[in-house]
Image (cartoon, rainbow, N blue to C red):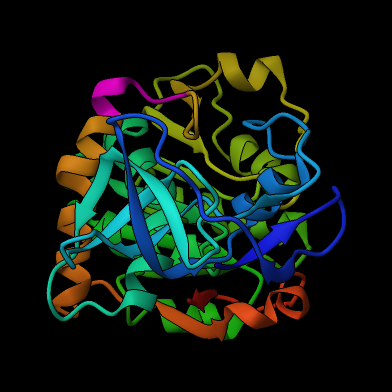
Amino acid sequence: MKAAVMYQKGELPQYVDFEEPVVQNDQEVLVSVKAVAIKHFDKGTAAGTHYSSDAPKATSRVIGGDGVCLLEDGTRVYGMGVSGMLAEKATIDKNRIVKLPEGLSDATAAGLANAVIGSAMALKFKAVIQPGDVVLINGATGFTGIVAVQIAKHYGASKVIATGRNVQSLQNLLTLGADKIIPITGDDVQFLDSVKQSQQEKPIDVMIDYLWGRTAEVLLSSLMGQGSFTNKVRFVSVGSMAGDLIQLSAANLRSVDLQLTGSGLGSWSKQQVGQLFSEILPEMFQLAADGKLKVETIAVKLMDIASLWNLEVADGKRLVVIV
């Protein structure tokens, strides 16, 4: 079979002939792969830099963690790979499969899944979003942030505030559910004042953060209290595109009713992951099929994987390899 194979850490994957994977137990099934999104998570795990993965030990392996595929009987599903997914054939976990609805393209399903995991899990289980909540999405112009804006509104947020560096992308979010946009210009004072103004209009209940770094520091400082009662804020870290470390004042923590948590692999319970596959992903795939959840993908070919691996993609779009 043809596959995208990584031979050495730090090198580019290669389009080569590779041995088909073999089912190892009765919890696995062999599938024909149709579409796989290229995500930061895939790049991090392939290079061994993501916190959930050990440094790669194998000298050659197929990359890609999830995607759209066909079961032996022709049923089209989204599945989590046991073997690498960027190949014509893969093995997937029977317990981590979602049947895809009619009207949903392979590219959209493949691109959407990881973004749903990176947004719905944070909103539903970590922020425990309630109807009427005011939600701020920090880093909303990225692919997952765009999905988070839409899902927050779907889950009943009364107001969604979107922050990001790309002003045009922020403007576009106003048509996808955002009620207010705050540009990240690099001017901390201006950013802080804008967030505080939003707080004064109506207290923010939830902050979903995809950036961390300096913007997270500013957001947390915007919540600083002065000894009086404060509105409870659930701050959820999902990504760290702006840096892995921050400085956080102890006085900041003591002065506000703050729940600070993260959402990612290792932070969810088995029951929550079960709900992801039995309830959340099916619901979101159906919303997308009905045109109520919108994403933009760029379809590319598996044979071009080496030239695509480090390709810079425009804000809010995702590369999807069509196999």
Where residue 219 appears, as percent x and y from the top left, is: 60, 43
Q: Which of 188/36 is in front?
A: 36
Q: How many marks?
A: 0
Q: Looking at the figure, which quarter contains the N terminus? A: bottom right
Please indicate whether residue 19 sits to the left or right of residue 114 in the image: right
Q: Which of 64/167 is in front?
A: 64
Please indicate whether residue 68 sits to the left or right of residue 146 in the image: left
Q: Which of 241/108 is in front?
A: 108
Residue 96 in which image quadrant:
top left
Where residue 10 appears, as percent x and y from the top left, is: 87, 53
Looking at the image, residue 37 lies above or below residue 159: below
Q: Which of 29/181 is in front?
A: 29
| Residue drawn where x is 74% and y is 77% of the image | 311
| Residue drawn where x is 48% and y is 76% of the image | 323
Where residue 93 appears, as percent x and y from the top left, is: 34, 39
Looking at the image, residue 226 lies above or below residue 123: above
Where residue 34 appears, as percent x and y from the top left, is: 39, 72
Looking at the image, residue 193 lies above or below residue 295: above
Residue 187 in which image quadrant:
bottom right
Residue 182 visible in this rendered orientation of the protein: yes
Q: Which residues are magenta?
A: 267-272
Please indicate whether residue 283 sits to the left or right of residue 305 in the image: left
Residue 108 in which image quadrant:
bottom left
| Residue drawn where x is 53% and y is 49% of the image | 196
Looking at the image, residue 199 lies above or below residue 226: below
Question: Does residue 240 show up magenta in the picture?
Answer: no
Residue 205 visible in this rendered orientation of the protein: no
